[in-house]
């Protein structure tokens, strides 16, 4: 089964649009030609020299990692550090590098959702939903073309709200206009005012597909000049954002839950604040460095907040309102590899996708 890199990455970006990544991030194709055919895919949490060498040995010409090998711009590529050496090795061996980082963090079914799944959380929801990621298109359409214009927008991806699709609001009215010299009106005559029964159609859509929705709408609309406008919706999107909050099916005592957490994530150590002497039922979590979500976890009524990369003084911010459990950056995201394998093989069932055998965790523990 042959396909181009762009087919793989295009599918991943439908699930986790690049628009959803944080401003500091560098998700997407970092090295390689998007039009090149893929032989095999190697999946890894991090992209390192050892992972590139593994890809060479296994005949993979595309590495998909969670963390980008390049965050900041490179002014020189001379091999002076592991980032530059990894880039050089990939280019020499004609291996493409693709990263799917905070855009995968910020979707339902993403990194934090995988963590919640490991713990069996019920009714998981985004801990901090994002705002300004939805848009609303309003278009005025003659009654004769309402169905076709509306369907074209639906087919382009507009009108989805949670578990519902083909959602729209329609208002009957009439429009007036006067075709001027040189126009080619569908309805009316030059220099004569026309009054037409129209419907105002309103649909919501994710910001990244704005161009696709507009092209579809304009292609289906009969008018030479289409009256429409696009507005940014300030509402939060409950299906896009950071972290996850959910409930255990059965509350656990704190010591019992910590043992459960250690077993489910294969942990050597958990750094945590003092136990509060109350059961753990409501759990907030975030893969990677999620300390910025602590206040969200408190407001959500969480009994414990599980994340990584906490500094000494930041543990005091728990203020006795919940436990903080730092399980380690790699450890919190380690199952992202399996998540990516599941997503890709579900779509491309007969394609060779491998998980790295390299341990890319730079932190080791002495016991």
Image: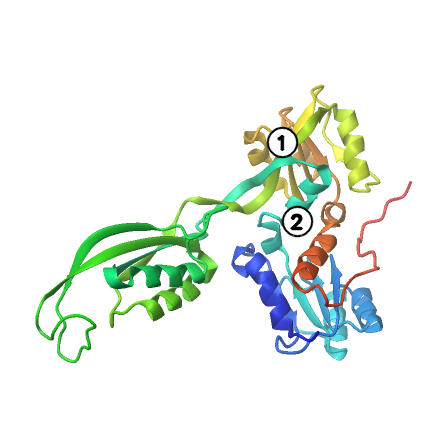
In percent of width and height, residue 359 lies at 83, 56
Can you say which quadrant of the picture contains the N terminus? bottom right
Tag 1 secondary structure: helix
Q: Position of residue 265 (x, y in %)?
A: 78, 42
Q: Which mark is drawn over residue 147?
A: none
Task: Tell me if I can see residue 64 in this picture.
Answer: yes
Mark linked to residue 111 = 2
Q: Position of residue 346 (x, y in %)?
A: 67, 59
Left or right side of 233 for 311: right
Q: Is residue 251 above or below residue 293?
A: above
Residue found at the very far top of the displayed protein: 277
Q: Residue at x 74, y 50 (%)?
A: 335
Q: Which residue is at the front of the view, 162 or 292? A: 162
Measuring from the top left, give residue 84's x and y in whole percent: 73, 70
Residue at the right extreme, as displayed: 367
| 182 horizontally vs 39: left or right | left
Q: Which mark is residue 317?
A: 1
Q: Give the secondary structure at mark 2.
A: helix
The colour scheme of the drawn protein is rainbow
Task: Please tell me which of labels 2 and 1 falls first in the chain.
Answer: 2
Is 291 on the left or on the right of 196, as rendered? right
Q: Residue at x 27, y 69 (%)?
A: 222
* Whole-number angstrom distance, CA of label 2 to CA of label 1: 25 Å
> Is residue 16 among the parts visible in the rendering?
no
Label 2 or label 1, whichever lies nearer to me, is 2
Residue 316 sits in quarter: top right
């Amino acid at each position: 089964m042959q396909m181009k890199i762009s087919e793989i990455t295009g599918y991943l970006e439908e699930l986790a649009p690049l628009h959803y990544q944080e401003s500091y991030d560098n998700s997407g194709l970092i090295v390689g030609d998007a039009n090149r055919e893929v032989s095999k895919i190697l999946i890894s949490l991090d992209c390192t020299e050892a992972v590139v060498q593994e890809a060479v040995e296994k005949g993979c010409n595309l590495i998909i990692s969670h963390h980008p090998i390049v965050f900041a711009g490179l002014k020189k590529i001379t091999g002076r550090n592991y980032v530059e050496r990894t880039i050089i090795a990939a280019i020499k061996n004609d291996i493409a590098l693709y990263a799917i980082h905070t855009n995968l963090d910020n979707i339902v079914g993403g990194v934090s959702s995988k963590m919640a799944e490991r713990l069996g959380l019920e009714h998981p929801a985004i801990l901090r939903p994002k705002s300004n990621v939805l848009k609303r298109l309003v278009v005025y359409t003659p009654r004769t073309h309402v169905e076709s214009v509306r369907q074209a927008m639906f087919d382009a991806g507009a009108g989805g709200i949670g578990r519902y699709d083909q959602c729209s609001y329609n208002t009957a009215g009439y429009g007036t206009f006067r075709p001027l010299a040189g126009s080619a009106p569908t309805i009316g005559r030059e220099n004569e005012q026309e009054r037409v029964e129209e419907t105002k159609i309103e649909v919501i859509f994710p910001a990244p597909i704005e161009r696709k929705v507009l092209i579809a709408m304009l292609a289906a609309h009969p008018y030479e000049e289409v009256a429409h406008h696009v507005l940014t919706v300030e509402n939060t999107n409950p299906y896009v954002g950071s972290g996850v909050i959910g409930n255990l099916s059965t509350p656990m005592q704190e010591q019992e839950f910590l043992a459960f957490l250690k077993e489910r994530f294969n942990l050597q150590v958990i750094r945590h604040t003092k136990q509060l002497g109350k059961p753990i039922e409501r759990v907030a979590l975030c893969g990677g460095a999620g300390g910025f979500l602590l206040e969200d976890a408190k407001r959500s009524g969480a009994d414990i907040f599980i994340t990584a990369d906490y500094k000494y003084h930041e543990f005091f911010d728990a203020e006795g309102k919940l436990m903080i459990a730092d399980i380690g950056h790699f450890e919190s995201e380690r199952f992202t590899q399996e998540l990516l394998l599941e997503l890709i093989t579900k779509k491309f069932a007969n394609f060779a996708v491998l998980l790295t055998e390299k341990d890319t965790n730079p932190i080791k523990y002495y016991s």
